[in-house]
Each structure stands twice: as structure tokens, then as C-alpha cells.
Image (cartoon, grey):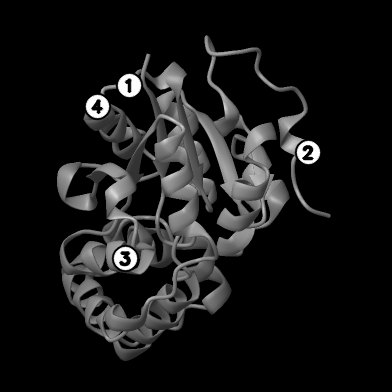
Amino acid sequence: MERAAVFDVDGTLVDTNHLHVATWWEAFRQAGHQVPMHAVHRAVGLSSTDLIAHLLGDDRDKDQDAELSAAHKALYGQYFDRLPPLRDAGRLLRRLDRNGWRVVLATSAGGAELSALRRAISADDAITATASADDVDEGKPAPEPVEHALELAGVPAERAVFVGDTVWDMRAGTRAGVRCVGVLCGGIPRADLLDAGAQAVYEDPAHLLASLADSPLADVPGDADTHSGQADTQRG
């Protein structure tokens, strides 16, 4: 039977979270809002509309949402030609592809931003499909992005693993019924990822690649006995 490895992109495969923090902070500042950077960081991973609602509240001037989103998009777009992949991100995807996993991206990015992220990863040959923000009605932490990724892969939830860097990723994956793996390279604490549903936490793609044989991506139910103590498969 087929199996799917579903990956978030920002902060998981490409080192972009703090670029999003700085550009969202500037977009809010230009619009007259004082939003602390630490609060923006915690909201990264949500769709633009949900991030704005999360940070400004439901009593905000919602007519300003599109302007804020456009400002962030323009500011962040300045980095499209130099987005830095996280260490061994492409190698990890290629290894999983060789090991028989269907690799699918599930990201809130779309359009030119998604194209820039895929160029940074430089592993299109290993990617089966991409579930982008353009394909779903609700973003993470709703399960729809992960569920759509599974549909594209043609794989049931019990034969899939979702890798992400935020609590929104872990909640989306858990709600979709897949096993979740967290990475710390997005800047979210290990404890938060575990509390949100991560079964194991790794430093970054390179650490996950080096630990692959003992990770949830070593097998899926029905292939072999599942590993125990996977949440401890992590550095220091």
C-alpha cells in the first residue's frame, strides 16, 4: 500500500518564519497597528486572514484586511529570489521518495510565493503534489489542508505522517487523523509542539534525515511494528 509524507513548508523546509515576522510587523506598523514581534511569530502558519484576525481581533476594521495582506505580500516578495532552504530539506524529501513515500506539500502559500519556496527546496523531482492555499477554503489549524494533501496522494490518514513546525500544523494534522512530527527550526518550543499533538520532535530536516530509521517516517501501521518512545527521538 502507498504511504504519504506530508510537509508544511515555511519554517519546516525553508527558513522563512522570521522573514514573515518582520514583514507582517512592518505591514501592521504601516497601517498604524502596534503588534509585538513575538505575537506575530506565534501566529505564523495561519492563513493571512486568520493571522490578521488572531492578532487584531474580531472588532478590527475588516475592510483593512486586504490592504494588510497586500502590504505583507509586497514586503515578503522582496525575498523571493533568496529564500534559504533549511539544511538537508531537499535531501530529506528525496530520501523519502526513494523509500517509497509519496511526498506532498501542504502550505498556506500559493502563486508566486509557492513557486519561490519550491525553487528554494529544489526537490521537485521528489514532490508528488502540493496542497496550497489556493486549493482549500480553510487553512490550518483546520484539517482541510492536510486532508486535501492526502486526497492528492491517494493515501488514507492512517498511512500518512505530517511534518510541521507550528502548533497550527500539529493541530491540523491531529484533526486530520495523521501522525504528526514537529521540527524546532521554526522557533516554536518543543513542549508546545508536543502539547499540540506531535509524536516526535526533531531539530530540523537534517536531524530528521539522520534519525529517519527510528522516526515515525521509518514505517506506518501495517508495514512493521511501530516504534515506541518516538517523542524522545530528539537532540538535547
User: Which residue is at the far right?
Assistant: 236
Q: Quadrant of the C terminus?
A: bottom right
* Sequence-first disc among 2 and 3: 3
Let me know if residue 33 appears in the view.
no
Q: Earlier in the sequence, mark 3 or mark 1?
A: 3
Whole-percent x, y for residue 162 in the image: 47, 37
Query: How far is mark 1 from mark 2, CA to CA?
Result: 27 Å
Identify residue for label 1: 155
The amino acid type, in three-letter code, at marker 2 is Asp
Earlier sequence position, callout 1 versus callout 2: 1
What residue is shown at x 43% (from left), y 78% (from top)? 19
In the image, is 131 to the left or to the right of 140?
A: left
Q: Are marks 1 and 2 in contact (CB under 8 Å)?
A: no
Q: Quadrant of residue 138?
A: top left
Q: Which mark is residue 151?
A: 4
| Element under disc 1 | loop
Q: Which residue is mark 2?
A: 232
Q: Identify the element where label 4 is drawn.
A: helix
The circle on residue 135 is none
Cα gap from disc 4 to disc 3, whole angstroms: 22 Å
The quadrant in which the N terminus is found is top left
**In the rendered structure, are the residues bearing label 3 and label 1 in contact, judged by CB atoms less than 8 Å apart?**
no
The residues tagged by marks 2 and 3 sit, at their Cα atoms, a distance apart of 30 Å
Query: Mark 3: which secondary structure?
Result: helix
